[in-house]
Image (tube, rainbow, N blue to C red):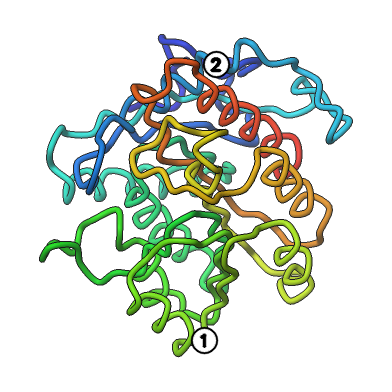
């Protein structure tokens, strides 16, 4: 995919048409090849873009307007259907090219496994990086039913690459006993059930660091985000996730990229999931892109 051509489909609201002038690039990863329950997150990027049209361009949370951020919507990476290994290679190559041009990447998923190749690419540029992971699921399995390429495994892979002590997970309320044991014994930082308050307490430890942020929409309670593949009862509210995004924006960490994954629109005829996701992306653009 060429970056210097405007995306011909629907774009995120207020997206600019000049890639070269953009500080941030939105891109989609329409992949759900390894999901363990309900498929359909490959349609998430498109629905998030469509829902964004209903947003106000001004954020009262950030007191900023989207016209104040130069960003470009590059569309979806044309991933080969049903081929996870090649899809991950393509995502890693794509992010590498964005980073070569000093762009801030904002990815739309797609299943959560897509975060793994992003981190592989970003780690090459920022070997001292840390990860903030906001999710209902630990994603710390080594494999799922014998398959190491699974949306249940990305955070474990990331721990092994950047060191578990550099991984900070929030909102976790689902996983195998062994995953929680690994988190406890490995030195990674896991906060169960809640996001904003433990994040507020943890951010000083990340002061001045290069941090990538990945958000799985299923951290929200299904009442707020039913449109996801593996919904988990007992989640946080949309307001708490907005507060978390604001906390990160007000901190002095250096956000080096972000993604929002696992929106599966077929399970939410009200579209509240895509509507919420588009608002989170707006806040990420306004709060995290320098």
Callout 1: 10 Å neighbours few (<14), some, many (20+)? some
Tell me the quadrant of the picture where the N terminus can be found.
Answer: top left
Q: Nearer the viewer, residue 161 or 182?
A: 182
Q: First in sequence: mark 2 or mark 1?
A: 2
Question: Where residue 128 sits in the image (x, y, percent)?
Answer: 57, 74
Tell me the quadrant of the picture where the C terminus can be found.
Answer: top right
How much space separates mark 2 and mark 1, taking CA atoms? 39 Å
Number of numbered discs overlaid on the protein picture: 2
Callout 2: helix, strand or loop?
Answer: helix
Question: Where residue 83 sits in the image (x, y, percent)?
Answer: 13, 42
Q: In this view, does 273 lie above or below 141?
A: above
**In the picture provided, is 244 more to the left or to the right than 155?**
right
Question: Where residue 142 sits in the image (x, y, percent)?
Answer: 25, 72
Residue that protrudes farthest toward the bottom in the picture: 185
Q: Which of 2 and 274 is in front in this view?
A: 274
Q: Nearer the viewer, residue 7 or 38?
A: 38
Callout 1: helix, strand or loop?
Answer: loop
Checking the image for residue 89, the label placed there is none
Residue at coordinates 50% horizontally, 54% vertically from top-left?
135
Residue at coordinates 51% horizontally, 72% vertically from top-left?
127
**Quarter residue 146 falls in:** bottom left
**In the picture provided, is 50 more to the left or to the right than 112?**
right
**Quarter residue 82 falls in:** top left
Q: Is residue 242 above or below residue 282?
A: below
* Residue corresponding to mark 1: 187
Residue at coordinates 52% horizontally, 52% vertically from top-left?
214
Q: Nearer the viewer, residue 165 or 68?
A: 165
Residue at coordinates 50% horizontally, 41% vertically from top-left?
217
Checking the image for residue 51, the label placed there is 2
Question: Where residue 215 sits in the image (x, y, percent)?
Answer: 53, 48
Callout 2: 10 Å neighbours few (<14), some, many (20+)? many
């Amino acid at each position: 995919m060429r970056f210097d051509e405007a995306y011909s489909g629907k774009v995120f609201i207020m997206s600019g048409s000049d890639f070269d002038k953009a500080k941030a690039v939105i891109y989609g990863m329409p992949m759900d090849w390894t999901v363990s329950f309900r498929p359909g997150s490959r349609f998430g990027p498109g629905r998030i873009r469509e829902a964004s049209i209903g947003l106000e361009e001004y954020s009262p949370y950030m007191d900023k307007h989207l016209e104040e951020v130069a960003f470009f919507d590059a569309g979806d990476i044309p991933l080969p259907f049903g081929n996870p290994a090649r899809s991950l290679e393509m995502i890693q190559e794509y992010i590498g090219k964005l980073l070569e041009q000093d762009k801030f990447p904002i990815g739309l998923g797609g299943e959560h496994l897509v975060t793994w190749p992003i981190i592989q690419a970003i780690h090459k540029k920022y070997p001292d990086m840390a990860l903030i992971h906001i999710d209902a699921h630990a994603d710390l399995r080594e494999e799922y039913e014998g398959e190491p390429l699974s949306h249940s495994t990305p955070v474990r892979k990331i721990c092994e690459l950047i060191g578990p002590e550099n991984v900070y997970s929030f909102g976790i309320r689902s996983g195998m006993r062994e995953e929680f044991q690994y988190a406890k014994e490995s030195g990674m930082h896991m906060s169960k059930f809640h996001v904003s308050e433990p994040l507020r307490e943890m951010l000083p430890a990340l002061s001045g660091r290069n941090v990538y942020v990945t958000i799985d929409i299923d951290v929200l309670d299904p009442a707020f985000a039913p449109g996801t593949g593996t919904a988990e009862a007992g989640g946080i509210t949309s307001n708490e996730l907005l507060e978390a995004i604001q906390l990160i924006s007000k901190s002095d960490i250096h956000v080096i990229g972000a993604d929002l994954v696992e929106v599966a629109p077929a399970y939410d005829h009200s579209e509240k999931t895509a509507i919420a996701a588009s608002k989170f992306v707006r806040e990420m653009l306004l709060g995290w892109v320098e």
